[in-house]
Image (cartoon, rainbow, N blue to C red):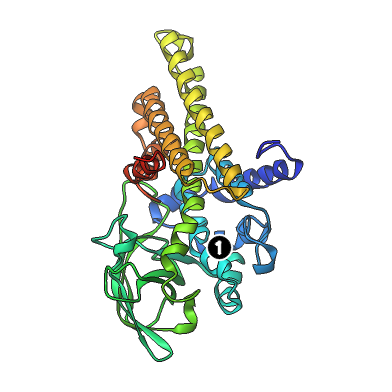
Amino acid sequence: MTIVDTPERRQLRELTRAFVTKEVLPYLDDWERAGEVPRSLHETAAKIGLLGIGFPESVGGSGGDLLDSILVTEEVIRSGGSSGLIAALFTHGIALPHMVASRDDGLIDRYVRPTLAGTMIGALAITEPDGGSDVAGIRTCARRDGDHYVVNGSKTYITSGVRSDFVTTAVCTDFPGSGSLSLLVIEKGTPGFTVGRRLEKLGWHCSDTAELSFVDVRVPVANRIGPEDTGFLAIMQQFATERLSLATQAYATAQRCVELATRWCRDRSTFGRPLASRQLVRHRLAEMHTRAEAARAYVHDVAERVAAGEPVVTEVAMAKNVAVAASDFVVDAALQLHGGFGYLRDAEVERHYRDARILGIGGGTTEIMNEIIAKGMGL
């Protein structure tokens, strides 16, 4: 059976669609203009079990696995949400897994459970102003001082960095750029930890993004995730899930835009005929639909292999690139088919057009994915 075929997953899809219809769609435009989603949305999603999907019940989650998380992501967007909403509401999907994997009861009780209950918000801070995709070159440094680390450095492009209560932060525990990394949980409000300006972006407007600064920030050693110098491996192990989430956002955005464009072309008439009656338009819609569905099938196939424990690093990179390419083509074609209306903020397709551009950058750029694929080919 496929990801969507079990009765339980059909119910999960229906729950997600009902949540988006009632709790998101009436307010999404306002959140886009405000630059963030309200904290209350996290609590609402937690109460009905959506926030904890993919996390075990033993740490406060709702159970389920990677495939269930993919289903929720897909349905949020297919129901009229957006990849920006996914980034804002489900940031814990990249902030918490390292803590869960460490099995550190102290960290789980202090951060994981409250976040999955919707009462805290977490973020992940890896990228630095001069670092980009070079994780091993991280320069934010943590010097051991008794029972604390003293952290100095900066991070940028941090999703939910404005609203977050804590940040899972990658730091160098040797000399800057040495590749000797650890992960520390740093709480908002700790002296020396400041949130810089809210970054204004092309898309993902409802997802707040920030610059972070650390100046002599004292962080308890107890807030370290796992043993010292194991951060690089921990980060790499979670990349597959993050990249598959982005791939899901890409193909789901493409599917939603196919639906929007098809509906528009059936209803919109020019020169006395519906747009959909014209062969050129029909063929364009057919090509859009084909690319979206092919990307979805491949991402699902790779996700099932990841969920089964297969080491498919190359395939994950290919899945992300395939889905992003499909999304890039479809959102552009969908906006073009909408004509002048597609260029207005009133058009849902306009939001998807803007939001989709980040998907080939976040979680590893298309170029980085191609390098991984080339290495998988033995090149």
Question: Label 1, on which residue?
Answer: 40
- All told, the count of numbered labels is 1
Residue 348, given in percent of the width and then of the height, sits at 45, 36
- Above or below, comparing residue 361 to residue 251 in the picture: below
Are there few (<14), some (14-19), or many (20+) residues within 10 Å of tag 1? Answer: few
On the image, which quarter does residue 303 sit in?
Answer: top right
- Above or below, comparing residue 339 to residue 311 in the picture: above
Q: Quadrant of the N terminus?
A: top right
Residue 38, given in percent of the width and then of the height, sits at 49, 60
Q: Is residue 22 something that shows in the picture? A: no
Q: Is residue 262 something that shows in the picture? A: yes
Residue 195, given in percent of the width and then of the height, sits at 33, 70
On the image, which quarter does residue 275 sit in?
Answer: top left
Name the residue: 41% across, 50% down.
32
On the image, which quarter does residue 108 sit in?
Answer: bottom right
Mark 1 belongs to which amino acid? Ser
Residue situated in front as seen by the camera: 309 or 99: 309
- Above or below, comparing residue 56 to residue 227 in the picture: above
In the picture, measured across the screen, residue 202 lies left or right of residue 3, that is: left
In the picture, measured across the screen, residue 64 lies left or right of residue 93, that is: right
